[in-house]
Amino acid sequence: QVQLVESGGGLVQAGGSLRLSCAASGLASRSAFSINAIGWYRQASGKQRESVASISSSGSANYADSVKGRFTISRDNAKNTAYLQMNSLNPEDTAVYYCCWSGRLGVYWGQGTQVTVSS
């Protein structure tokens, strides 16, 4: 059973940084993680879930306009782990952040990690 576990969330002051991790387990092979794309999403209280960043199997990254220049998505296929480096955080970034591993091997979500940015 594939599982994704996010970590690294917490409380940070505006202007600060956090690094989120998304670790996958239960994969069928050592190379499986590299096959699917990784997406980071967030859902603020009372709002719909939105895409923040994604990275393809080949390493091509895309970002929401609201985080461009501040967030960086990356992946370490050898560690079955994806990351989201978040800099210059502001209160509007407060949300539960989820990672999603998706592609021809299926779609799997993590349980989310809370990020709270105080002003």
Image (cartoon, rainbow, N blue to C red):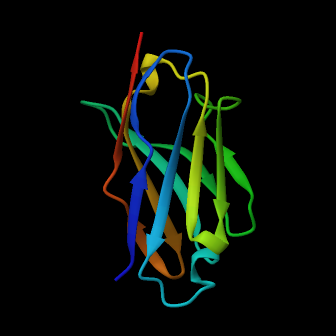
The answer to whether 107 appears left or right of 36 in the picture is left
Q: In this rendering, is residue 53 above or below 101? A: above
Residue at the left extreme of this rendering: 46
Q: Position of residue 22 (x, y in %)?
A: 48, 58
Q: Position of residue 51 (x, y in %)?
A: 49, 45
Q: Residue at x 60, y 70 (%)?
A: 79
The answer to whether 83 appears left or right of 109 in the picture is right
Q: Residue at x 42, y 50 (%)?
A: 7
Q: Quadrant of residue 33?
A: bottom right
Q: Quadrant of the C terminus?
A: top left
Nearer-the-camera pick, 101 or 49: 101
Q: Quadrant of the N terminus?
A: bottom left
Nearer-the-camera pick, 64 or 20: 20
The answer to whether 52 appears left or right of 26 in the picture is right
Residue at the top extreme of this rendering: 119
Q: Position of residue 11 (x, y in %)?
A: 38, 27
The answer to whether 50 appears left or right of 68 in the picture is left
Q: Position of residue 48 (x, y in %)?
A: 33, 38
Tag count: 0
Q: Residue at x 75, y 68 (%)?
A: 58
Nearer-the-camera pick, 74 or 9: 9
Q: Quadrant of residue 50?
A: top left
Q: Residue at x 41, y 54 (%)?
A: 6
